[in-house]
Amino acid sequence: MSESSGRTDVSERPNWILQHPAYQQMKSLEVGDCAQMHAAFLVYMDLVEVRRWKDVSCVKSPELQVVLLEGREKDTAPIHTILPLPVDRPLSHKSIRYVLDRGFPMLLCAVASDSTLVYQRMTDGLVTPDPPAGPFEDAGRRQHRKRRQRP
């Protein structure tokens, strides 16, 4: 510590992530994949601190050897399972099936090296998309076509 500034040198400060209780809990699950555990922690922080999800917890998937997150978007919402993965990790149908078989709606979260998070809702089967929201009118296809002029 420099006496003149009263601040601790950056190299002397402990990494706050390693000291965080959620990271310590994830570490105690002993998944062995540090990159996936780091991704899970970043997603945990996003869900809890930014998106304000409720009841977020971490669980180990013994089949996949990864940290999964479970939580609710709102107090009355159903529990979701979130699979955080670094973007360079392969993902198989089998691993998605393991998570879907847990019985909760699933979110896949791809975590980039710059900490960008991309969430993708995964479903068991095909789901019809919601109609677009907004003041759209169906003008019909024929109204927009131009007639060919005969020479």
Image: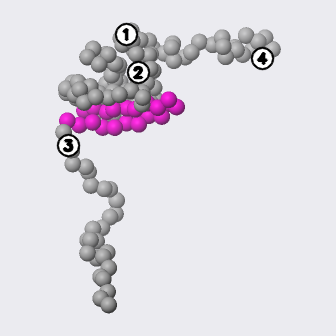
Secondary structure beneath label 3: loop
x, y percent for residue 142: 26, 75
Question: Is residue 120 placed above or below 26 in the rendered structure?
Answer: below
> What amino acid does circle 4 point to?
Ser
Q: How many marks?
A: 4
Residues in magenta, as a range: 105-124
Quarter-wise, where is residue 126 in the image? top left
- Quarter of the N terminus within the rendering: top right
Judged by depth in the image, the label closer to the viewer, 3 or 4, is: 3
Q: CA distance from mark 1 to mark 4?
A: 40 Å
Residue that numbered label 3 is attached to: 126
Could you tell me which residue is drawn at 48 percent across and 15 percent down?
20
- Looking at the rendered image, the quarter that the C terminus falls into is bottom left
Which residue is disc 2 drawn over?
A: 36
Three-letter amino acid code at disc 1?
A: Glu
Work out how far the residue at label 4 is from the one at label 2, CA to CA, in angstroms: 38 Å
Q: Which one is nearer the viewer's eye here, 57 or 31?
A: 31
Q: Residues within 10 Å of mark 4 (few under 14, many from 20)?
A: few
What's the magenta bit mostly, secondary-structure-wise? strand
Residue at the location (39% across, 12% down)?
32
Which residue sits at x=32%, y=29%? 91
Q: Between disc 2 and disc 3, whose residue precedes? A: 2
Give the class, few, some or many, for how many residues have Cα within 10 Å of label 2's Cα (few <14, many ≥20).
Answer: many
Where residue 59 appears, as percent x and y from the top left, is 31, 17
**Can you identify the residue that label 4 sits on?**
5
Image side of residue 113 versus residue 105, left or right? right
Question: Is residue 71 visible to us here?
Answer: no
Which residue type carries mark 3?
Leu
Magenta-drawn stretch contains 108: yes
